Image (cartoon, grey):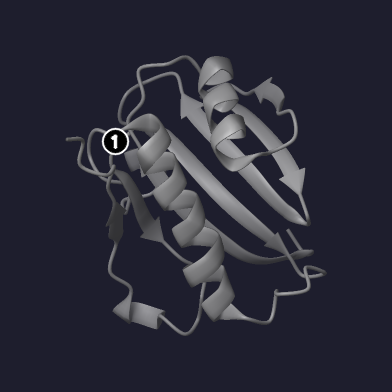
Amino acid sequence: MDNVAWHEHLAFHAELDLEPLCGVIRAALDLPPFEFGSENETEWGLCVLDRVEYNVSMPYEDGTLQAWDDTVPDGCNVGMTLLVGKDHPRAADPAWVVTTLVRGVGQRLAAQLDRAIVYHRTSLPAFGDGFHPHVFRAPDKK
């Protein structure tokens, strides 16, 4: 954790199991292959691209994400953390983290998964206590 500048947190609901879900995320974001693992309460997939880690966690029991972090909205069973390394060329640019990285990931996932993606927690000090969750929504289909 010492080499991470930012931890940005998104959450959503998915019906897919973790590995197929990470396959969809990989395609949507043009990521390298995910590595998978598990612990006593959750399974996870992660990959790193350009000094940003994409970490997807899917606990075994409903409500676990909310028990771990009370900012996770009810009904979400997947947490995704974007970890920006201190050695990332934009690590000192909080505007890039929000407007390019988080927004890009949120919008692309919402469109690909056809569901709301909630940006529910930030480590950006510029937001302080004034952070309000943002919901990325799938585009309307006509």
Q: Work out whether 110 lies above or below 38.
A: below
**Dot 1: element:** loop
Classify residue 121 by image quadrant: bottom left
Residue at 68% from the left image edge and 35% from the top image edge = 46
Instruction: Tell me where residue 102 appears, x and y as whole percent.
Output: 49, 59
Q: Is residue 67 left or right of residue 99?
A: left
Give the residue number, with chain letter if any, for mark 1: 115
Residue lying at the far bottom of the rendered structure: 126
Q: Which image quarter holds the C terminus?
A: top left
Q: Quadrant of residue 26?
A: top right
Residue 29 point in image, percent of width and height: 59, 42
Q: Quadrant of residue 110?
A: top left
Locate the N terminus and report the quarter of the image it occupies.
bottom right
Q: Residue at x 64, y 56 (%)?
A: 83
Instruction: Tell me residue 50's x, y (percent).
Output: 78, 55
Q: Amino acid at mark 1?
A: Arg
Question: How many numbered marks does the figure carry?
Answer: 1
